Image (cartoon, rainbow, N blue to C red):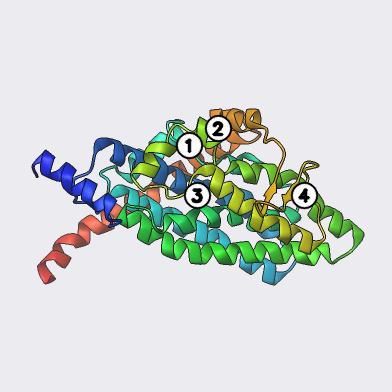
Amino acid sequence: MDQQYGQERFATTIESDEKVEPRDWMPDGYRSTLIRQMAQHAHSEVIGMQPEANWISRAPTLMRKMILIAKVQDEAGHGLYLYSATETLGVSRDELQEMLHSGQQKYSSIFNYPTLNWADMGAIGWLVDGAAIVNQIVLQRTSYGPYSRAMVKICKEESFHARQGYSILMVLAQGSEEQKAMAQDALDRWWWPSLMMFGPHDSESPHTEQSMAWKIKRITNDDLRQMYIDQTVPQAHYLGLTIPDPELSFDEETGHWSIGAIDWDEFWATIKGDGRLNRERIAHKVKAWEDGQWVREGAMAYADKHTPRLNKSA
């Protein structure tokens, strides 16, 4: 395709709010930005299985165990959808794994925090998946077609994840004093990291302006964070829990909740690999990848063996 024609068609597609598809011409920067964002999203889904899988065998009831198993399986599926969508941009899944393992690509900073007790499963579902939903509902309108379509199913499942987390904390908050203390402690530890999930302030985000222009992102980091705060604070109050922020206040004039300062030093240290569990999370992921090599080789050998027969019958 002629480059000038491709540029004009791409600009028209973005301006008219249509979807860019894999075979369409797109700027190199658009492609690389999508690969970075979609890969980080996929990596986060897969790494995010670790803190929850750790509690499957210790769930308090059979029902809770079944729900948590289903949730972890969902996260694996989300990673698969997103890796598949990212591959449409011309990068292989093996390349994406290598970039994650070597530190060239990142995953959400939230998954570098430990899960200390069962209440953390509630906090992750309510706060972490709740933050993900706020961000991902908007991504259903992102300008890249495969990413947009993948988000439709993912958002439906994430809504279930948030509800199961809130359900866990509701039971604890209505239980004994010890159980309510567990719920409050989980909120205390996960509140600020969940706010960091939306990324740095817009003024300090190197990608926001261009991603907004390309309509990869539709709402800025700070606006998404505010939407999340406004939705989550009343939910905490309903549970009878206290948001761990002495500066939290409601602005009658704007109709928004205001918060204190986020510790961005903690955020940047975690992003750079100095979080509490960065090394452990990646080491576990690398080991799982290496241990599964024989499965991938077997699947490829099976496919190679049967492809001629399938092609002949097609």
Mark 1 vs mark 3: give the one in front. Answer: 1
Q: Earlier in the sequence, mark 3 or mark 2?
A: 3
Q: Earlier in the sequence, mark 2 or mark 1?
A: 1
Give, as a three-letter code, the residue at label 2: Ile
Across and down, in percent, residue 296 comes to 36, 50
Q: Earlier in the sequence, mark 2 or mark 4?
A: 4
Q: Which residue is mark 3?
A: 46
Mark 2 vs mark 4: give the one in front. Answer: 4
Question: Is the residue under label 1 in contact with that under label 2 (CB below 8 Å)?
Answer: yes
Name the residue located 59 percent from the left edge and 47 percent from the top edge.
Answer: 225
The disc at residue 243 is 4
Q: Earlier in the sequence, mark 1 or mark 3?
A: 3
Quick one: SS at disc 3?
helix
Across and down, in percent, residue 303 comes to 25, 58
- Spatial separation of the CA atoms under disc 1 and disc 3: 12 Å
Q: Residue 149 falls in which quadrant of the image?
A: bottom left
- Spatial separation of the CA atoms under disc 2 and disc 4: 25 Å
Question: Is the residue under label 4 in contact with that under label 2 (CB below 8 Å)?
Answer: no
Give, as a three-letter code, the residue at label 4: Ile
Name the residue located 39 percent from the left edge and 43 percent from the top edge.
Answer: 212
Q: Quadrant of the N terminus?
A: top left
Q: Residue 118 falls in which quadrant of the image?
A: bottom right
Mark 3 vs mark 4: give the one in front. Answer: 4
- Spatial separation of the CA atoms under disc 2 and disc 1: 7 Å
- Spatial separation of the CA atoms under disc 3 and disc 4: 29 Å
Give, as a three-letter code, the residue at label 1: Lys
Mark 1 vs mark 4: give the one in front. Answer: 4
Q: Which residue is mark 2?
A: 271
Q: Is residue 32 above or below residue 125?
A: above
